[in-house]
Image (cartoon, rainbow, N blue to C red):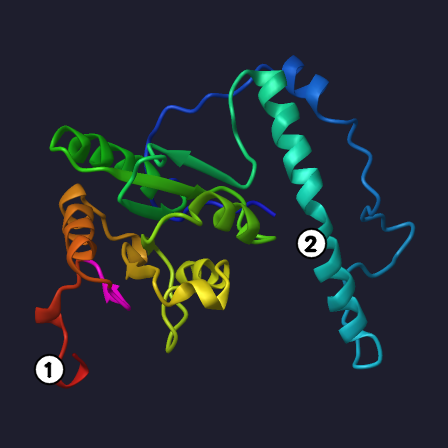
Amino acid sequence: MVCMDGFILTHAFEPVDVPDQKEVDNFLPPFRPTNIVDPRWPRGIGLFADPRFYMETRYILHRAMEKSEETIKKVSQDFAKAFGRDSGGFIKTYKLKDADVVVISMGSLVGTIKDLIDQLEEEGKKIGLLQICSYRPFPRKEIYNTLKDKMNIVVVEKSISLGRGGILASDVRWSFPRAEKKDRNISSFIAGLGGRNITKNDLRYMVEKVEKEPVELEFLGLKKELIAEKDL
């Protein structure tokens, strides 16, 4: 399955670091697919599971996803050793140690956030970033261990669970024990839906707002003039 940050990466030009074919061949194991499509041997792959087996199928998939944690860590370390650059793992951080406000995000938005953090640092503000690199299994342990001493956290994401709010924000809140949530501010912002551009000014507004008070849920850069008053 190929998962990409829609529109920004799929419809824009940007330099890409592609390793040499020999390096890739040395890193990856030989390609020997377990399941192949062969007309001489007709069979079904990924067929429907009826109620007698469906729950067990989902349980096995869930457990396999949980067990993938060690594999993700090891492959990330192996990749860095082979290619000399970090590309993977569960989370990455940027200027987080002394941060008063921590921004959590993922995907192409991270680059813009880093630029803003650098600008705000010149203005005397301490803002840090925690980037989610692997979404499932969700790195709740890594998030908690990294942010257990941080009280002001803001999640900005380009996704929403309609009728509930930010999907990433909900998972981040799940990462902290219930007893610790009372005194911890975890704000949620939705931005960039449908490929709308997210500017540094938008993100600056977000940071300045959560410095004053927590935000349960807000749509960043919303054009309210396009919305009927009854829907606001």
Which label was assigned to residue 45? none
The three-letter amino acid code for the residue at tag 1 is Glu
Q: Which residues are magenta?
A: 215-220
Q: Is residue 204 magenta?
A: no
The residue positioned 54% from the left and 16% from the top of the image is: 84
Q: CA distance from mark 1 to mark 2?
A: 45 Å
Q: Nearer the viewer, residue 103 or 13?
A: 103
- Name the residue tied to disc 1: 229
The x and y percentages for residue 106 are 40, 45
The x and y percentages for residue 185 are 31, 60
Tell me the element at label 2. helix
The residue positioned 18% from the left and 44% from the top of the image is: 199
- Name the residue tied to disc 2: 66
Q: Is residue 217 magenta?
A: yes
The three-letter amino acid code for the residue at tag 2 is Glu
Is 169 on the left-hand or right-hand side of 90? left
Furthest-left residue in view? 225
